[in-house]
Amino acid sequence: MSIALSYFRWAFIVTAVGLAAAFWLGWGYSNSLGGAVSFFLIGLVLAVLEISLSFDNAIVNANKLKDMTPEWQRRFLTWGILIAVFGMRVIFPLLIVVIAASIGPIEAIRLAALRPDEYARIIGASHLSIAAFGGSFLMMVALNYFIDEGKEVDWIRSLECQLRRCASVRGLEIALVLAVVMVFASVLPAHQTGRFLFAALAGLLTFLAVEVLGHVLDARQAAMTAAARGGLGAFLYLEVLDASFSFDGVIGAFALTHNLFLIAIGLGIGAMYVRSMTIMLVERKTLAEFRYLEHGAFYSILVLSVIMFAQTLWHIHEMITGLLGAGFIGLALFSSIRHNRRQDAT
């Protein structure tokens, strides 16, 4: 137990510093103890929200990291986490406001600090495009995992065997994503269809571009040294994947508070726990020990992608998203433990 907790040492430190900063920020805005405690509690809830939504992200990260060189593993766990915390939790929401409101970045920061309600309104107006982009990207990630001839282990066999057999059909996963996009586009109001289609196709093309770029970069590195598998290409893939996972958390955070700085603190704390879980999964080879855990993560990603598409039509509470994701991972963990017991008994 103590060994497992040691992986979360930095996460605990960041939690203490972050919650203290949230308390201080609340005192600065309200000049009252009640306001400070309110900010403290919201920061804590945001951290829990980020952890619940991103546990599957840690599993997928670990699956990719185990094939990367130690040098690129270190780079992702240092530079990558900085990009994840500051890029997606701070810069990304600011960039949305800069583009949507046609203002400069300095003005966007002022808007976030002085007029948080207007800042949140602009973010909310961009929700359709964000959900469409993230939905198509994450659906491609999940389908690319299941529709794979080289996949050897099946959890839900009746479904996964059929998907694996279909892997010989070129571009099947792209066709499935486009079919889902067409269904949702057909029921959206006419004035939203253009934005939805543009963002969904951008998500699809981003996945394909990252895949192509990753193969090209890793092939060049492999030509220089056989040990250079899983380098820059895998790093870029994980960064885009983390960005897609972060969409839901960033947008959902505005349901709790409109303060950008408090959102950054809460989600940043959660991101540190995701980093710690990723390191633990890689170093302790947990994915190899629990054979279906990875399957649960990708089913969770598939469900999240459908929910993101559905959010273009209805509001779906983030708690539902988190519980569904945790449910699939929990079932996969239970199935893995049961499989291990059967193996030990034979």
Image: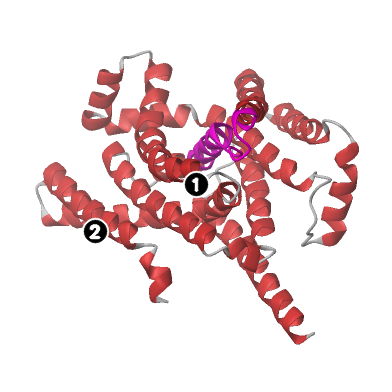
Q: Residue at x 42, y 17 (%)?
A: 99
Q: Most extreme residue toward the bottom, as rendered?
A: 345
Q: Quadrant of the N terminus?
A: bottom left
- Disc number for residue 16: 2
Give the alpha-carbon distance from disc 2 to disc 1, as whole Å.
30 Å
| Kind of element beneath mark 2 | helix
Q: Which residues are magenta?
A: 221-247
CB contact under 8 Å: marks 2 and 1: no
Residue 38 visible at all = no
Image coordinates of residue 61 in percent, x first then y, are 55, 48
Amino acid at pointer 2: Ala
Badge 2: few (under 14), some or many (20 or more) residues near its Cα, within 10 Å?
Answer: few
Badge 1: few (under 14), some or many (20 or more) residues near its Cα, within 10 Å?
Answer: some
Residue bearing the label numbered 1: 70
Q: Looking at the picture, tell me which residue is in the foreground, 52 or 311.
A: 52
Q: Looking at the picture, tell me which residue is in the foreground, 167 or 231.
A: 231
Is residue 128 magenta-colored?
A: no
- Disc number for residue 346: none
Number of disc labels: 2
